[in-house]
């Protein structure tokens, strides 16, 4: 370490490194492309330029400040902004990211210097973790934005649906609306009845026994009598029996018929068990 400090004092400017310069170009250019892909179509050009140049400056600075060297981040960013908008003005279209990265890397290397070793204090572990978390959050946000605006889902028959459209449709789907309503119902019950039974309400809402879905399939309410459940079951069985179904979708009718039978079986077992438990409690009383 003393030898390094002595060399720093003798040489005021760091020695130029081709590998470091190439790394600055590669990472700066990569970040510029990454940011551009993460931005949606129709983003105003000034905003595009500001964010892309920020990605260039961060990429150049990350490589350039490795080890014992450092350089001006803000001025590198301002120069990349100037280069981007000048090239855009001269070319009549969006400026080349590689030229912007090259200009930023050249400026950074021209004004780079050794890091000061005076009374430098070691950063607290929590500060390091916060910096790392902030960087990880930015990368995660960029990847999420990139996938949201560029990824596509292959549906049946080879049809491709943009991920952003699929996400928007999901939040309007009956499945999400039912889930949202269920969560609000649980929250409302917890406010009125207290939070002690929140776990029971949460488990019940997800219908682990299949009882709630069985009532829905048979189109009866939980307050329906056993006779009413039996009548609804017989009516649906006749309607969806594969041999009596008049439609063309015999396979669909078969699945529906099996679902009806399964639902009736669930309700029969649950009600029989409930009746047995009630009679047992009465006998014990």
Image (cartoon, rainbow, N blue to C red):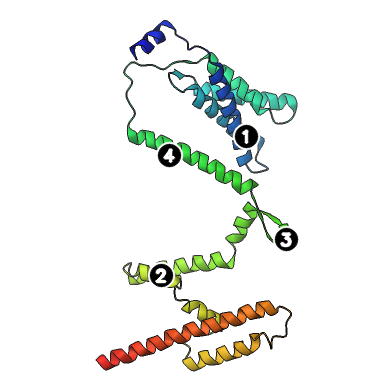
Q: Viewer-proximal residue, 246 or 197?
A: 246
Q: How far is the residue under mark 4 from the one under mark 3?
A: 42 Å
Percent of width and height locating residue 229: 51, 89
Which comes sooner in the sequence, label 2 or label 4? 4
Which comes sooner in the sequence, label 2 or label 1? 1
Percent of width and height locating residue 273: 39, 86
Percent of width and height locating residue 226: 47, 91
Q: How far is the residue under mark 3 from the one under mark 1?
A: 33 Å
Which comes sooner in the sequence, label 3 or label 1? 1
Q: How far is the residue under mark 4 from the one under mark 1?
A: 22 Å
* Tag of residue 283: none
* Quarter in which the N terminus is drawn: top left
Is residue 191 in view?
no
Structural crowding at the residue carrying mark 3, measured as other residues with C-alpha within 10 Å and reported as few (<14), some (14–19) or many (≥20): few
Say whether marks 3 and 1 touch (CB < 8 Å). Answer: no
* Tag of residue 133: 4
Q: Secondary structure at mark 1?
A: helix
Structural crowding at the residue carrying mark 4, measured as other residues with C-alpha within 10 Å and reported as few (<14), some (14–19) or many (≥20): few
In the rendered image, which quarter is residue 21 located in? top right
Which comes sooner in the sequence, label 4 or label 3? 4
The residue positioned 33% from the left and 34% from the top of the image is: 125
The residue positioned 75% from the left and 28% from the top of the image is: 92
Q: Which residue is mark 3?
A: 157
The residue positioned 64% from the left and 80% from the top of the image is: 254
Q: Secondary structure at mark 4?
A: helix
* Quarter in which the C terminus is drawn: bottom left
Structural crowding at the residue carrying mark 2, measured as other residues with C-alpha within 10 Å and reported as few (<14), some (14–19) or many (≥20): few
């Amino acid at each position: 370490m003393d030898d390094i400090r002595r060399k720093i004092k003798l040489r005021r400017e760091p020695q130029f490194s081709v590998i470091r310069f190439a790394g600055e170009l590669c990472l700066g250019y990569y970040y510029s492309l990454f940011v551009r892909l993460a931005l949606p179509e129709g983003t105003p050009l000034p905003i595009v330029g500001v964010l892309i140049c920020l990605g260039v400056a961060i990429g150049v600075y990350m490589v350039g400040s490795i080890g014992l060297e450092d350089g001006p981040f803000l001025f590198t960013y301002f120069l990349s902004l100037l280069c981007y908008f000048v090239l855009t003005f001269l070319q009549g279209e969006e400026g080349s990211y590689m030229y912007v990265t090259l200009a930023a890397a050249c400026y950074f290397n021209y004004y780079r210097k050794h890091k000061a070793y005076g009374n430098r204090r070691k950063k607290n572990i929590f500060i390091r973790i916060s910096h790392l978390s902030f960087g990880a959050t930015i990368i995660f946000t960029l990847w999420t934005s990139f996938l949201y605006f560029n990824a596509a889902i292959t549906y049946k028959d080879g049809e491709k649906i943009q991920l952003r459209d699929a996400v928007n449709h999901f939040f309007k789907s009956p499945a999400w609306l039912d889930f949202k309503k269920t969560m609000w119902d649980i929250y409302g019950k917890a406010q009125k009845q207290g939070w002690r039974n929140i776990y029971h309400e949460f488990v019940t809402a997800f219908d682990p026994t299949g009882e709630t879905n069985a009532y829905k399939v048979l189109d009866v309410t939980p307050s329906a009598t056993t006779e009413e459940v039996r009548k609804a079951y017989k009516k649906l069985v006749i309607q969806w029996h594969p041999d009596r179904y008049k439609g063309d979708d015999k396979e669909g009718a078969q699945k529906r018929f099996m679902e009806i039978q399964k639902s009736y079986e669930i309700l029969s077992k649950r009600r029989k068990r409930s009746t047995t438990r009630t009679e047992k409690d009465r006998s014990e009383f």
